[in-house]
Amino acid sequence: MQIDKELFRKTYGAFVRSHLEYAVHAWRPWFKKDYLQHHQEQARATIMFKNLSHLPFETRLVELDLLPLNDRQLCDDLIQTYRIIRGRDCALEFADFFKLAETEHLRGHPIKL
């Protein structure tokens, strides 16, 4: 059975990535062995695409327009930081994590951590 790249991206996002990233802020893999296990899961999912199975992992990610797991985690961390700072959909308190810088030179925005 042949699937196109768009169908693969949708299927991968719905089943594989959602499983790997579920509640990642609570359990993020800190040890190298845990990170490598998740990396192998992503590699295994992308190698199923037959037309790209002969390519290196990084090239498969580019061809399928997917981000590596560590880039996705960085993006999710930035989104979570934004939610904490703005108080949107987050039960965490700003003061428990951050302290605002005491400077007046902020180039047009009110927040500097």
Image (cartoon, rainbow, N blue to C red):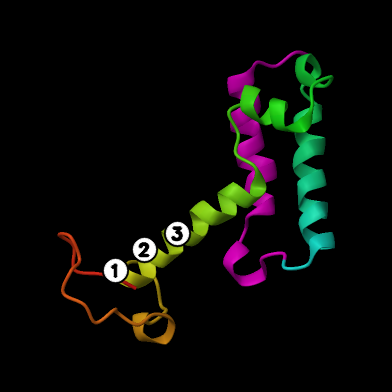
Residue 32's spot in the image, x, y percent? 80, 62
| Tag shown at residue 82 | 2
Between residue 27 and residue 18, name the one nearer to us. 27
Residue beneath the point at 18% across and 60% down: 107
SS under mark 2: helix
Other-residue count near label 1 (Cα within 10 Å), few / some / many at <14 / 14–19 / ≥20: few
**Amino acid type at mark 1:** Arg
Please name the residue that numbered disc 1 is placed on: 86
Residue 111's spot in the image, x, y percent? 25, 69
| 56 lies above or below 33 | above
Residue beneath the point at 39% across and 80% down: 98
Q: Quadrant of the C terminus?
A: bottom left
Residue beneath the point at 42% across and 79% down: 92
Residue closest to the far bottom:
96
- Asked whether disc 3 touches disc 2, contact meaning CB atoms under 8 Å apart, the reply is yes
- Asked whether disc 3 touches disc 1, contact meaning CB atoms under 8 Å apart, the reply is no
Image: magenta residue range: 1-29
Between residue 33 and residue 90, name the one nearer to us. 33
